[in-house]
Image: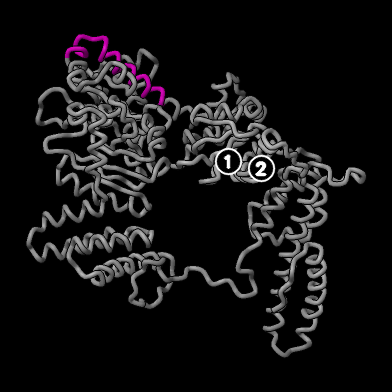
């Protein structure tokens, strides 16, 4: 575990404009910087970097935080990994605490697997470049595919000779025992090398570590599979990995699109040609984990196929999952006899990209045309197509998208819109009933309407009329904002009262009634730290251990607006009003007043409902009536101070 003082050292050294500037083209705007957000696709910059606060905030997608948070989000790293990334950037030596024996052993076991795989990659590369057989067989094969030496080294390609135990012997010389090599599938239980006479492909995880291998056979042996892969281990789960994702993630985010191909060489060939936003699912249909992995970087997938009908139909089944995740999926069929590798070498990257743009078809359109072509004039098979397409459309959660697909596909299928709506409605109803059965919910009677709006069912009871239709989270967030941004400032220096102490004195009795668990947690923590004489500076919250608190701090400390310097420089108009961050005393008074008003109003409504419930039982109603009178007086006095008009029902 990294020591807090080391984390603080990283926080102190890391400058947000430098960290973000490694990935985003920033332009100065007053005291801050702005640029296009790296987390979502936009044409006008809404991404703001505040050097004074050392935070970033996107007013488009809402992402916000400090340098560590930015690296975590952008590079998809854990908190410790992001700290280490910045420590390397700023040449800071981290100090770490001793872990428990069990934790240390578990981590060492995982680290050992990565180390052995790294050794194996280096071994295979040495065999490729530095041995006669490697050069004559493996290197010749890769050169025939058009791969340059720097590409081979970048992707960790190599060669395994037809030797019974060459890797095992080399591993033992490096101090790796046979059991580790067996665990990773590099050596068989009989202590023989698993990969022999094959060109080797290293498989990397999202952070670039080698987690597995695939080997393509060189000899023509019908009894041997063309490709063999490492078995699944603690660091490799095939269904969660996409080949090339480490090399593609930045480009996928940049172009807001992921190209999906079938083979390793397809990925490498496109990457070498400058098309880097490409990954491979290794010939299998996309799994839910792989879809979620892509969705971390983009909502847009374009799948490139070489025209094999069986493979396409198998893949289509997996793409329903992508539609259910509200992703945009397009498919491209390459010309007969071509695969991505051969076609890009034939036409070049510019023509290849143009082809993808012109020939890409929406998944539902693609599937409809494919199935109709197969069905021909057979009425039974054409009826089956309707069912299959209805099933695909039913997976789409967005009702507006479903509605659009109905309009388009029913024309292609030549069916009545009502018939198609009925089929989709039936499937939605079936899926809904399955979900409700799992949740123990009794479904409502069908109304026969097409759910282009969200399905009409209820999983939670309606809030009673005594509750506010809109919660008090806005006021609660405002209290959290005041405490984070100015809690340590003087509210009344004469009486040694800080803003945080003023807030505490005035809202202590309503904290238990907070709607938001996050805002309540932040407020309580701040008040506890005040009582203990601990730090409540802005930087404490920006660097908070809880990512939700860090996000909140960055959000409340950043505004999309700022005073323009041009008022004074160009127009000689001098602005005398205080900046929002300097107006914290009035801010605190208003925030406290508005929160108390909302809570009082809620209590009055709850009491009124109780009085109504008790009907004509005056004795039972009496204490509630008296309480309501007192609450109404308090509320009305507060409303007068705040300038709020009380509407009496």
Magenta stretch: dominant secondary structure: helix
- Quarter location, residue 207: top left
**The residue positioned farthest toward the left in the image shown:** 377
Give x and y (percent) for residue 305.
Answer: 20, 40
Q: Is residue 558 magenta?
A: no
Coordinates of residue 563 in the picture (x, y in percent): 67, 40
Residue at image location 25% in from the left, 23% down from the top: 200
In magenta segment, residue 128: yes
Q: Which residues are magenta?
A: 113-136
- How many C-alpha atoms fall within 10 Å of the one at disc 2: few (<14), some, or many (≥20)? many
Q: Quadrant of the N terminus?
A: top right
Check the image and report above or below for 68 versus 332: above
Placement of the C terminus among the 4 image quadrants? bottom right
Q: Residue at x 19, y 49 (%)?
A: 313
Q: For the view shown, which residue lies furthest in the bottom direction?
A: 616
Q: How many marks?
A: 2
Residue 274 horizontal side relative to residue 506, left or right: left
The residue beneath circle 1 is 57
Q: Which quadrant of the view contains residue 255?
A: top left
Q: Position of residue 319 (x, y in %)?
A: 28, 50
- Do the residues under discs 1 and 2 have CB atoms within 8 angstroms? yes
Identify the disc placed on residue 557. Answer: 2
Asked if residue 512 shows in the view, the reply is: yes
Q: CA distance from mark 1 to mark 2?
A: 9 Å
Q: Is residue 532 left or right of residue 59?
A: right
Front-most of residues 571 and 310: 571
Residue 317 at x, y percent in the picture = 25, 51
130 or 648: nearer the viewer: 648
Q: Earlier in the sequence, mark 1 or mark 2?
A: 1
Between 90 and 270, the one nearer to me in the picture:
270
């Amino acid at each position: 575990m990294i020591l807090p003082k080391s984390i603080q050292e990283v926080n102190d050294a890391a400058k947000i404009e430098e960290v973000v500037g490694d990935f985003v083209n920033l332009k100065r705007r007053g005291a801050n910087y702005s640029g296009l957000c790296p987390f979502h696709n936009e044409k006008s910059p809404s991404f703001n970097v505040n050097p004074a606060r050392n935070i970033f905030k996107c007013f488009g997608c809402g992402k916000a935080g400090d340098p560590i948070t930015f690296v975590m989000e952008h590079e998809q790293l854990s908190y410790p990994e992001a700290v280490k990334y910045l420590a390397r950037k700023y040449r800071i030596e981290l100090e770490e605490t001793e872990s428990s024996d069990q934790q240390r052993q578990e981590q060492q076991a995982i680290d050992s697997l990565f180390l052995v795989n790294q050794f194996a990659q280096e071994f295979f590369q040495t065999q490729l470049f530095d041995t006669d057989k490697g050069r004559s067989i493996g290197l010749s094969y890769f050169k025939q595919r058009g791969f340059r030496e720097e590409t081979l080294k970048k992707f960790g390609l190599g060669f395994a000779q037809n030797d019974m135990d060459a890797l095992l012997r080399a591993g033992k010389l490096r101090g790796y025992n046979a059991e580790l090599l067996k665990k990773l599938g590099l050596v068989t239980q009989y202590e023989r090398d698993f990969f022999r006479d094959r060109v080797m492909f290293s498989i990397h995880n999202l952070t670039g570590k080698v987690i597995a291998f695939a080997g393509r056979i060189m000899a023509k042996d019908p009894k041997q599979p063309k490709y063999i892969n490492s078995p699944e281990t603690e660091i490799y789960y095939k269904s969660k990995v996409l080949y090339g994702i480490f090399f593609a993630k930045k480009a996928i985010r940049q172009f807001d699109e992921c190209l999906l191909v079938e083979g390793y060489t397809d990925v490498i060939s496109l990457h070498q040609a400058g098309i880097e936003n490409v990954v491979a699912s290794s010939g299998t249909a996309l799994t839910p984990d792989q879809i979620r992995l892509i969705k971390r970087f983009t909502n847009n997938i374009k799948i490139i196929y070489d025209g094999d009908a069986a493979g396409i139909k198998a893949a289509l089944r997996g793409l329903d999952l992508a539609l259910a995740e509200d992703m945009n999926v397009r498919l491209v069929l390459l010309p007969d006899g071509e695969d991505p590798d051969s076609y890009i070498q034939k036409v070049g990257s510019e023509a290849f990209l143009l082809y993808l743009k012109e020939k890409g078809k929406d998944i539902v359109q693609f599937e409809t045309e494919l199935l109709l072509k197969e069905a021909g004039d057979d009425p039974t098979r054409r009826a089956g197509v309707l069912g299959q397409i209805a099933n695909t459309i039913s997976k789409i959660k967005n009702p507006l998208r479903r509605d659009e697909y109905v309009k388009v596909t029913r024309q292609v299928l030549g069916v009545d819109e009502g018939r198609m709506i009925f089929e989709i409605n039936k499937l939605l109803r079936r899926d809904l009933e399955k979900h409700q059965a799992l949740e123990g919910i009794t479904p409502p009677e069908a109304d026969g309407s097409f759910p282009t709006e969200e399905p009409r069912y209820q999983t939670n009871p309606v809030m009673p009329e005594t509750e506010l239709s809109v919660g008090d989270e806005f006021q609660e967030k405002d209290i959290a904002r005041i405490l984070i941004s100015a809690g340590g400032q003087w509210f009344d220096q004469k009486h040694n009262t800080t803003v945080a102490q003023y807030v505490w004195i005035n809202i202590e009795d309503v904290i238990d009634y907070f709607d938001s668990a996050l805002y309540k947690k932040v407020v309580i923590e701040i008040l506890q730290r005040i009582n203990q004489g601990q730090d409540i500076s802005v930087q404490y919250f920006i660097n908070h251990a809880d990512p939700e608190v860090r996000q909140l701090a960055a959000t409340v400390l950043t505004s999309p607006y700022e005073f323009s310097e041009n008022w004074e420089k160009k127009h000689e108009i001098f602005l005398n009003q205080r900046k929002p961050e300097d107006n914290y005393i009035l801010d605190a008074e208003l925030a406290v007043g508005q929160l108390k008003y909302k809570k009082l109003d809620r209590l009055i409504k709850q009491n009124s409902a109780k009085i109504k419930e008790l009907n004509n039982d005056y004795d039972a109603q009496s204490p509630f009536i008296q309480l309501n009178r007192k609450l109404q007086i308090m509320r009305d006095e507060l409303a007068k101070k705040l300038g709020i008009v009380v509407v009496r029902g």
